[in-house]
Amino acid sequence: MQAGASDDGRAFAARFAEAIFTAHQTLESAKAFYADIKRQARAFDRGPEEIKILPGISPFIGSTQAEADRLQEEFNELIQPEYSLTQLRQMIGVDLTGYDLDGPVPRHLIDTASARGAASRFKLVVDIVDREKPTIRQLVQRLAGARGHWVIAGTPEKIADNIQTWFESGAADGFNVMPPWLPGGFDVFAEQVVPILRKRGLFREDYTGTTLREHYGLARPASIYSNAVKAIA
């Protein structure tokens, strides 16, 4: 498993990783990352199917959109600004303590030319700021629970629709589900979203193996010592 989307991280993953845990906020970003990894893998004589790309998804699930939105708002109200601003400073290198939480993120203070600018999470946060122009409060709400991974609120059908779109659009081979709370959030996903995915032929009915590698459908790599053993024999 590999995590991280910097240029060095991508090159390393394309050469060695069998599964990649990655963070994307948009379908377009996920598709670009997916295509880049698969392309680089070919340069190392690896088949695209040898690497499974698994974006994180943090779903707030409700019987209606309004119910899901209220659930997300309840969690946002639990955020401790002091902690969240510390977390944000670690990501972008800017201390926003003392700024109006409901004011705009001071984009001019973020130095994209610094060494930090090559970090994948830094780029993700800057992309949110540039694309959505959030307030500081809105930004920390986006990052507080899922740490920059994809947060979505909606009905089980909406969650399943989006998962299907990402999968069929070449943005993901699967997902790392990151429920807002445990174990309840995962139980809701398993009980309400998984059956929909099964009906659509997008999720297995039974497990046919006992290892994570088998669940991912990955072949077991040949031993690097196999040729040496044959030579000695």
Image (cartoon, rainbow, N blue to C red):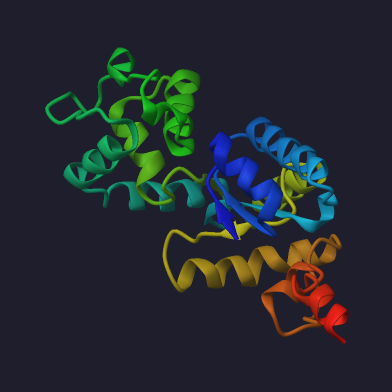
Q: In which quarter of the image is the C terminus?
A: bottom right
Residue 57: % across, % down: 56, 52
Q: Report whether 220 appears left or right of 92.
A: right
Q: Is residue 1 visible?
A: yes
Q: Is residue 192 above or below residue 128?
A: below
The image quarter in which residue 95 lies? top left
Residue 17: % across, % down: 66, 56
Residue at 23 percent across and 38 percent down: it is 85
Residue at 54 percent across and 54 percent down: it is 59
Closer-to-camera residue (53/118): 118
Q: Report whether 152 appears left or right of 214.
A: left
Residue at 37 percent across and 46 percent down: it is 73
Closer-to-camera residue (47/207): 47
Residue 168: % across, % down: 82, 45
Q: Which residue lies furthest to the front in this view?
A: 232
Residue 30: % across, % down: 66, 38
